[in-house]
Amino acid sequence: MDQHNSTYAVKLYVYDLSKGMARQLSPIMLGKQLDGIWHTSIVVYGEEFFFGGEGIASCQPGGTMLGAPNSVVELGNTEVTEEIFMEYLSSLGESTYRADRYRLFEHNCNTFSNEVAQFLTGSKIPSYITDLPAEVLSTPFGQALRPFLDSISIAPPGGNVVNGHYSQR
């Protein structure tokens, strides 16, 4: 926090869930190059916030089983206080981002990161991340795998669920 004007840095942590396998296998399997299968989170107020199969969760930055992010994108600064942000997250967790609303392609960690980034900074996350599901689904293999992929719920271990059926942080 900058004591002079009370702004807080907002960062996007980007993880490749495939650990490099997407880059190697996507040309063979999809007929197009994918650089990764992206999981993202927002880091602000000294914590990492993300959405997954358990709902909205938080941890120390880099504190999930995914380890250190593959890259960090500086999204800018926010003047939103932590208290207002936590109220915002709580309302999201009771409505739009409940655990049962998670969908791998349409409503996932990246959807959450994009919405939260816009709330905090007015900026979106990079389009190469938000466009990934459409890229996969535009291929015959992506369409064939869709029923299986739709059944997957990603929840990186190591976070504390912010609200929902689990304890408050």
Image: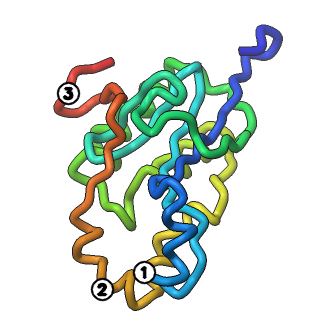
Amino acid bearing label 3: Tyr
Compute the Cα span from label 3 to label 2: 35 Å
Whether residue 131 is situated above or below residue 6 in the rendered picture: below
Residue on which disc 2 sits: 144
Residue ID at (46%, 77%): 136
Q: Quadrant of residue 103?
A: bottom left
Mark 1 or mark 2: whose residue is earlier in sequence: 1
Residue 71, x across and y down, in percent: 66, 44
Of tags 1 and 3, the one toward the viewer is 1
Residue ID at (41%, 28%): 58
Marking on residue 73: none
Q: What crowding class fits label 2: few (fewer than 14 Cα within 10 Å), some (14-19), or many (20 or more)?
A: few
Amino acid bearing label 1: Leu
Residue 61, x across and y down, in percent: 54, 26
Residue on which disc 1 sits: 137
**SS of the residue at dot 3?**
loop
Whether residue 119 is situated above or below residue 46 in the rendered picture: below
Residue on which disc 3 sits: 166
65 sits left or right of 151 in the view: right
Mark 3 or mark 2: whose residue is earlier in sequence: 2
Residue ID at (61%, 45%): 70
Q: Quadrant of residue 57?
A: top left
Of tags 1 and 2, the one toward the viewer is 2
Of tags 3 and 2, the one toward the viewer is 2
Q: Quadrant of residue 32?
A: bottom right
Mark 1 or mark 3: whose residue is earlier in sequence: 1
The total number of labels drawn is 3
**SS of the residue at dot 2?**
helix
- Residue 94 visible, this orientation: yes
Amino acid bearing label 2: Ala
Compute the Cα span from label 1 to label 2: 9 Å
In which quadrant of the rendered image does the C terminus lie? top left
